[in-house]
Image (cartoon, rainbow, N blue to C red):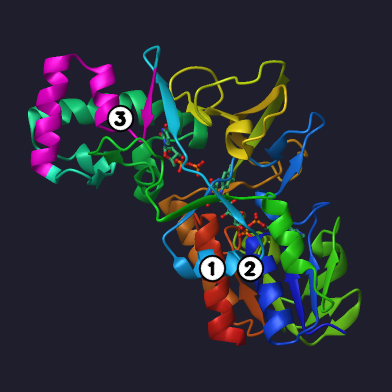
């Protein structure tokens, strides 16, 4: 009945379903264990009418015109530039740490001299990962690097990952580099916008096609089987001769053959408050205080003018497969040790010609929304077009 089965209705699965159905006229079955489409980008109105992001704040930003144009078929946009403050030494200062943060936190004369040094050494507008800045052989810049490492990175990273910054892939802390600039925005991408009717609407529009069937509330393991020796596939007990696109956990698809990969989970605590605005910017990070990493206030994103406001606090936690409070794998854990396990899975996956792995969990990559849309479009062009 189906040409392709897709496990996961996030961006990876939905983009591929949409492309296969519209451009190749394929009959596609999308399976997801959640009761909704959209994966981690799912948003909905809460009981108070505030548009919340159920799995944490999602801000769209990209430099890829092709990605922006592709998604624009399914939504209109509202311009939005994301800003984050960090609560440091009792003050709220811009994050990523920039020249404004420098002047807010350090005495005037020291800040001025450090600003000149940063500009002289790196140039105005440059972004410097903290782990790179710490290697600089200059006493004053070394002092600054240690200060930023201590105030912004080390404790936040301990909360978020249970690790030191140097014990995870440098790309992770490199996402929030020290910015030699007065630009307070979190991202500098060319296209930054919020879908006018929310993210979920994008997925509804993508999947609303007569060739696409969506099966929710269904763990793929209950309806689908992949034989790891022969590569044969079964859907509901009958042989399936088509293609599988898998966007869930790679170790789950391959039945833990090389051991379980670790993931990091989050506990989101939502609060509705009677005030109209809770905080000055969308997100405030708390690197050094409290057990949560950040608080996000959704009305800054949705720009709704209704009374009351909803915030969410993010409490990082270990992922536990069998604990319903901890079993959402938000982030793969990017360490050398895990990469070795991942490589074994990726190598093994090559023998399954009808299986394609795409997505944050399936590929174990720190994909942002635009990255995964770009990746899914590339996979379609390379393998299915
Ligand atoms: P997902 O969205 O995770 O979709 C995978 C789907 O597979 C899920 O729906 C899941 O239920 C399903 N699945 C898994 N296992 C099974 C199973 N056994 N059976 C059936 N279905 C299964 N990106 C940005 O660009 N900007 C941001 O501001 C941003 N903020 C983020 C904040 C947080 C807290 C997190 C965790 C991520 C954020 N991202 C952001 C990244 C963004 O969420 C991802 O890029 C995107 O969700 C990846 O899409 P995906 O399809 O690979 O994975
Ligand atoms: N980070 C930090 N302090 C901050 C913000 C980020 O130490 O105030 C580090 C932390 O390790 C985090 C990583 O930088 O996991 C990437 O941050 P980003 O905001 O990109 O994380 P995400 O939004 O993906 O959770």
Residue 102 position, x and y percent, is: 24, 25
The residue segment tinted magenta is 92-121
Q: Which residue is mark 1?
A: 69
Asked if disc 1 and disc 2 are in contact, CB closer than 8 Å, the reply is: yes
Q: Residues within 10 Å of mark 1 (few under 14, many from 20)?
A: few
Q: Choose the circle earlier in sequence order: 3 or 1.
A: 1
* Residue 174 in the image: above or below residue 115: below
Q: CA distance from mark 1 to mark 2?
A: 7 Å
Mark 2 near ligand 1 (CB under 8 Å)?
no
- Label 3 or label 1, whichever lies nearer to me, is 1
Circle 1 SS class = helix
* Residue 195 in the image: above or below residue 311: below
Circle 3 SS class = helix
Q: Is residue 199 left or right of residue 341?
A: right
Which residue ends up furthest to the front in the rendered image?
305
Towards the viewer: 278 or 128: 278
């Amino acid at each position: 009945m189906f040409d392709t089965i897709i496990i996961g209705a996030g961006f990876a699965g939905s983009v591929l379903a949409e492309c296969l159905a519209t451009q190749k006229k394929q009959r596609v079955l999308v399976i997801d264990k959640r009761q909704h489409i959209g994966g981690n980008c799912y948003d909905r109105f809460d009981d108070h009418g505030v548009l919340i992001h159920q799995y944490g704040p999602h801000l769209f930003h990209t430099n890829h015109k092709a990605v922006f144009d592709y998604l624009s078929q399914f939504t209109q946009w509202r311009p939005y530039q994301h800003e984050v403050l960090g609560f440091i030494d009792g003050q709220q200062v811009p994050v990523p740490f920039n020249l404004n943060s420098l002047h807010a936190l350090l005495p005037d004369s020291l800040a001025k001299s450090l600003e000149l040094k940063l500009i002289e050494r790196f140039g105005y507008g440059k972004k410097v990962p903290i782990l790179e800045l710490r290697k600089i052989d200059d006493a004053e810049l070394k002092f600054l690097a240690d200060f930023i490492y201590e105030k912004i990175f080390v404790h936040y990273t301990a909360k978020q990952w249970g690790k030191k910054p140097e014990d995870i892939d440098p790309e992770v802390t490199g996402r929030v580099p020290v910015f030699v600039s007065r630009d307070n925005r979190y991202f500098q991408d060319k296209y930054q916008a919020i879908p006018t009717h929310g993210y979920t609407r994008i997925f509804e529009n993508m999947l609303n096609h007569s060739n696409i069937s969506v099966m929710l509330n269904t763990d793929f393991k209950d309806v689908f089987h992949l034989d790891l020796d022969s590569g044969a596939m079964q859907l509901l007990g009958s042989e399936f001769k088509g293609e599988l696109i898998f966007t869930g956990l790679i170790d789950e698809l391959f039945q833990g053959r090389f051991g379980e990969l670790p993931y990091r989970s989050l506990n989101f605590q939502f609060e509705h408050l009677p005030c109209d605005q809770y905080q000055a910017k969308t997100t405030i990070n708390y690197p050094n205080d409290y057990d949560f990493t950040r608080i996000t206030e959704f009305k800054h994103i949705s720009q709704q003018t209704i009374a009351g406001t909803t915030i969410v606090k993010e409490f990082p936690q270990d992922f536990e497969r069998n604990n319903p409070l901890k079993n959402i794998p938000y982030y793969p854990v990017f360490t050398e040790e895990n990469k070795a396990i991942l490589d074994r899975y990726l190598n093994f996956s090559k023998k399954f010609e009808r299986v394609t792995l795409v997505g944050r969990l399936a590929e174990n990559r720190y994909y942002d929304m635009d990255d995964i849309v770009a990746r899914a479009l590339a996979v379609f062009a390379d393998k299915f077009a």
